[in-house]
Image (tube, helix red, strand yellow):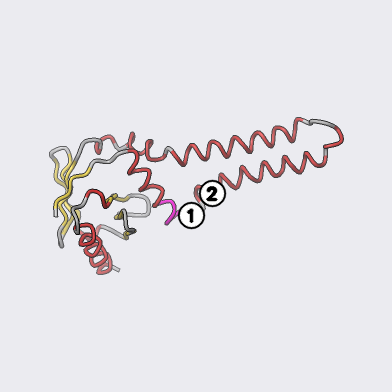
Amino acid sequence: MTLTFQYTPENLQQAYELHLKKFSPFGGRVMMLLGVLIIWAGLILMLIYHKQGIQMPYVIFIALGLLVLVFNYIYQKNIGKRMHQSLSEFHRPFQIDINDSHVMLHLNEIETVYEWDRFSKAVITEKQTLLYFNDKLFYYFPSTNFEANDYNNFCSLVRKMIAIQK
């Protein structure tokens, strides 16, 4: 099967959200937890110094915790846009040929062939599939780029080919 892809900030955001959810469940939550702990420390200080009026240490802690939470939220919600900017060669549509022996990428008039044994693992959901070369590098296949039943056939092929390697 031959597919035409074009990565957008929106579909890369979906891909990286799935990637982080599956393989780094605490990655995005560590900063959130840090922000909550800083706010909690500020609230404890506020309880200790509440009779002395407004004190700078607890105000600074609460403000710093809120800043950490806001920056973490912005970072998490803009990862697709940042990845799209760094993957400039994928801004234009490109084609991928998929068959039982390999995955061939046609990008900027260059053909790159990846044998199935190059992929180490896969994440398959109803709406998207991620094929991994290693723990950090993957190709994203949204179901919207497939014809009617092609996505199910592709998922079956991926399950079969990745299972053969393991």
Residue placed most toward the observer, 110 or 124: 124
The kind of secondary structure element at disc 2 is: helix
Which quadrant, please, contains the N terminus? Answer: bottom left
Residue 109 place in picture, x, y as percent = 13, 39
Residue 31 place in picture, x, y as percent = 56, 44
Residue 42 place in picture, x, y as percent = 72, 40
Q: Seen in the image, is 166 located left or right of residue 71?
A: left
Q: Which residues are magenta?
A: 19-25
The three-letter amino acid code for the residue at tag 2 is Arg
Q: Seen in the image, is 101 located left or right of residue 134?
A: left
Q: Main secondary structure of the magenta part?
A: helix
Q: Residue at x 79, y 30 (%)?
A: 54
Instruction: Report if the CB atoms under discs 1 and 2 are less than 8 Å apart.
Output: yes
Residue 118 place in picture, x, y as percent = 25, 57
From the image, tell me which residue sits under label 1: 25
Q: Is residue 22 magenta?
A: yes
Q: Is residue 119 above or below residue 105?
A: below
